[in-house]
Amino acid sequence: MQPQRAGSTSRGRGTGVLPPPGAAYSSHFAASMGWGCGAGMFPAGIVPGRGGLGRAPSRGEQNDYSQHFVDTGLRPHNFIRDVDLADRFEEYPKLKELVTRKDSLIAERATPPMYLQCDLKTQALGPELFGTKFDVILVDPPWEEYVRRAPGVEDSLEWWTFEEILNLRIEAIADTPSFIFLWVGDAEGLDQGRQCLKKWGFRRCEDICWVKTNKQNPSPPLRHDSNTLFQHSKEHCLMGIKGTVRRSSDGHIIHANVDTDVIISEEPPFGSVAKPEELYHIIEHFALGRRRLELFGEDHNIRAGWVTIGKSLTSSNFSSQTYTRYFADSEGNVWQGGRGNPQPEAPHLLGTTNEIEALRPKSPPPRAQQPQQGGGGGNSASQQPSGSRKSSQGGSQEGGGGGGKAEGGGGLVLRLD
């Protein structure tokens, strides 16, 4: 995802930003674009200190995206280019091939879409309902914030109290290891979501941020919300881990570092709580368990490889007997955690190919296995005791209900103590 550039279609060095309409090209901007500082170094039609192509100078003769937002309602991140999945990896052929091959394998091994219309306030969650536990659980609860930010249509939106969300029995349907992705909005849900993860037996290990563009429907220049201090244009999805997963040795369970933790996509229409489809791709690229469940889903969330549950669904086709057959071994048993991590050949895992393994990012070997620099009398890097080094990977270590990240013993460790 790279910002658009002004006055050039080349992809060399520069700021990579598109100045808003009416902005002037200053000497500082020209230098940062790699055009040099002399008058003869500017592209045709660009005059230092003047608006490009005959435009008058704007405030401060600079790319003032904040002022442009105030003037037009167009958010600054509308001007970042290559955010669509279709053209994001054009400059990175190996990464593009990796994503293409993974998507092909995911589609090939996906179970048919299944969905169950039910009210989660009255339907108890448990393995007896589904016939198995799950490797991935995606939850988008009806937070009060969703109603609060849509005045005028709140009567058509149902919302749950924090206590009702907290009391969902997610721990009863999450296998070990497993991952949860919890949408929490961008207000009090950030703190309440962490409490939910702790109560459900997960520990937060990542925070995916959805940055909302408004190219199609520019918002009023300023929103006045008594519950916020800034103009909000994002939402968060907390990711939690249950169990122990080592990136260096559990490549059949997770593939790390394929995607980023930022999603940039268009905001849905006013009153809609729909989330970007890209999150499904992030989850499927990362977690190789094929038992995937989405709670509070709607018809537009129905997807191959997933079980979707929600009150707003218009029909049901879920059968626990049919569903569990997709993951049963030769003896008809479905793998269940509690006795260590599954083996690579476990039927509920996605699997991989030699081509994917050659392309995907991998954890470096432990320091003890890396060749030392220099000869016998030269300097060499000493290895710290396992577990004594702070992780340099993404995410953070927080107190709570198990899991987290620690570096040592050959790469990233997602651990539940």
Image (spheres, grey):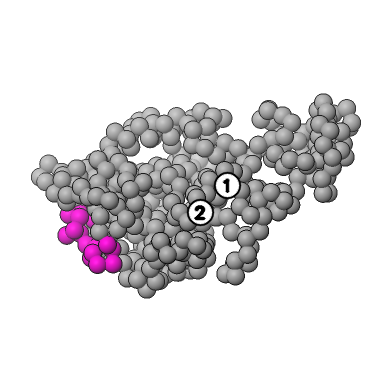
Q: Residue at x 45, y 29 (%)?
A: 97
Three-letter code for the amino acid on which mark 1 is drawn: Asn
Image quadrant in which the C terminus is located: bottom left
Q: Quadrant of residue 241?
A: bottom left
Q: Position of residue 340 (x, y in %)?
A: 26, 55
Question: What residue would you read off at disc 1?
Answer: 217
Mark yes or no: residue 363 visible. Answer: no
Q: Position of residue 386 (x, y in %)?
A: 44, 57
Three-letter code for the amino acid on which mark 2 is drawn: Phe
- Residues 339 and 370: in front is 339
- Residues 411 and 135: in front is 135
Sort mark 1 into few (<14), some (14-19) or many (20+) by Cα contacts within 10 Å: some
**Magenta extent:** 119-135
Image quadrant in which the N terminus is located: top right
SS at mark 1 in the image? loop
In the displayed structure, 151 sits above or below 355; it is: below
Question: What residue would you read off at disc 2?
Answer: 270
